[in-house]
Amino acid sequence: QARLVESGGGLVQAGDSLTLSCVASGITFIRSTMAWFRQAPGKEREFVAVIGRSGDGTHYADSVKARFTISRDNNINTTYLHINTLNPEDTAIYYCAATVSLSLSTDYYTQKENYEIWGQGTQVTVSA
């Protein structure tokens, strides 16, 4: 059974840093492109970052690229999202997603509809 489990969220203060983790099971992790999305209260789920199968290709939403870093460890089936200088606008549920689909289009991987497997999310709340 395919499963993604996120962890690392919590209540933090503005200016803090945080690393989220996503552990995959029941999938062939090395064949999966992994991504992070987030959903703030009352808003649509939005793309944050994606990382290719081998880990050498990444892409970020313009709004986060200066502060967010996505990485993965294929030895332990884990994807990470490191966030620097958190601000209240980063408050959201952060979701990990996986797809085995391949596309030459970077935009393909920014669309939530193109991911087959989702985690349950981890809440990040940033106080001012």
Image (cartoon, grey):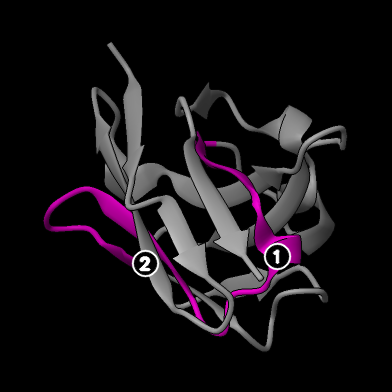
* Residue sticking out furthest to the top: 1
Binning the other alpha carbons within 10 Å of mark 1 as few (below 14), some (14 to 19) or many (20 upward) gives some
Circle 2 crowding by C-alpha within 10 Å: few under 14, some 14–19, many from 20: some
Tag 2 secondary structure:
strand
Task: Give the left or right position of residue 107, taking residue 1 as reference.
Answer: right
The amino acid marked with disc number 1 is Pro
**Residue sitting at 46 percent across and 25 percent down?**
120
Q: Answer with left or right where residue 67 lies relative to residue 122.
A: right
Place of residue 50 in the rendered image (x, y in percent of width and height, measured from the top left): 59, 60
- Kindly identify which residue carries mark 2: 19
Question: Which residues lie in the magenta part?
Answer: 72-100
Determine which residue is flagged by label 1.
Answer: 88
Query: Which percent across, then down, holds residue 62?
Result: 82, 76
Residue farthest toward the right in the current orientation of the protein: 43
The residue under the point 50% across, 25% down is 117
Q: Does the segment drawn in magenta span residue 63?
A: no
Of marks 2 and 1, which one's residue comes earlier in the chain?
2
Q: CA distance from mark 2 to mark 1?
A: 16 Å
For image coordinates 41% across by 51% down, the residue present is: 10
Q: Is residue 31 left or right of residue 94?
A: left
27 shown above or below 17: above
Q: Secondary structure at mark 1?
A: helix
Instruction: Tell me if 43 is positioned left or right of 88 in this view.
Output: right
Give me the residue at 55% from left, 84% from top.
15
**Amino acid at pointer 2:** Thr
Residue 46 % position (x, y) = 78, 47
